[in-house]
Image: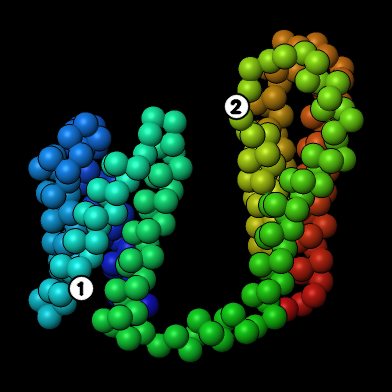
Amino acid sequence: MIVLVKLILAHLIGDFLLQPKSWVHEKEIRKLKSPKLYLHSFIHGILVLLLLWNFDFLLPALILMIVHGIIDGVKLYAQKAHTKSRWFLIDQGLHFISIVFVWMLFFEPDLYNFIYIIETASFWVYLTALFFITIVSSIAIRELMSKWSKALNENEDESLNNAGKYIGILERLFVFVFVITGRWEGIGFLLAAKSIFRFGDLKESKDRKLTEYILIGTLLSFGIAIATAMIVLEMNI
């Protein structure tokens, strides 16, 4: 497992610490003609060797270096101005998949522990709970509050696309973790922080409907997360 962690660390250092914005900009302009693309890939290979500190692993380091360059090259040609965020996620996902593949191919990890975790009841309970408080709850709250959201939409105002959805997902994840770990005071801090950020909107709008809508949505979101976490805890897994 420590080898996998080192491979991931090498990737994170190479992609996020040792890659200046000027390199990224040049690669986007010149694409495969940019020397920075090849230098960036070479750095990844060197980082793998440095962190593993074993030249017997030269081949996996070389493979990761080449694959990294190929993935970056594909992204440079595939991404558009409006799809950069999407391709960033795809790019990182492909890098992690390649790292795991090389790890399994060359280092023959003992997968028994992974299989054991997947077979435990707690794994499925937590997976189901996380799916419920993120995806399912977002849809449920949207449907429950659709009547009020239509009234609010009559007053057009600038807002980030799907911002409310992702804020809700994040706050429910935080609440779930706080309850599971017994950090109930964290919920109070989160609620206070959200109130402070929302105070300006409510003050400017002077709209009672908006205040009630936000309050109902917040209580629903927090209530679902707390109830889900309490059920998980009561299962004593």
Report whether 169 appears left or right of 136.
left
Q: Residue furthest front?
A: 78
Residue 88, position in %: x, y? 39, 44
Q: Residue at x 68, y 39 (%)?
A: 165
The residue carrying mark 2 is 160
Q: Residue 23: x, y in percent?
A: 19, 37
What type is the residue that disc 2 sits on? Leu
Residue 37 horizontal/vertical position (percent): 17, 46
Q: Quadrant of residue 110?
A: bottom left
Give the vertical position of 30 relative to 17 (above or below): above
> Quarter holding the C terminus?
bottom right
- Residue 164 position (above or below residue 186): above
The residue type indicated by label 1 comes to Pro
The answer for how far apart the CA atoms under marks 2 and 1 are is: 42 Å
* Secondary structure found at label 2: loop
In the image, 83 versus 22, the foreground residue is 83
Q: Please say whether residue 219 is visible from this viewpoint.
A: no
Residue 26 appears in which quarter of the rendering? top left
Question: For residue 166, which numbered disc appears in the image?
Answer: none
- Whether 191 is drawn above or below 67: the answer is above
Q: Which residue is mark 1?
A: 60
Q: Quadrant of the image for the N terminus?
A: bottom left
Q: Earlier in the sequence, mark 2 or mark 1?
A: 1
**Image-based side of 47 in relation to 223, left or right:** left
**Residue count near mark 2 (Cα–Cα under 10 Å), binned few <14, some 14–19, many ≥20:** few
Residue found at x 15% / y 67%: 62
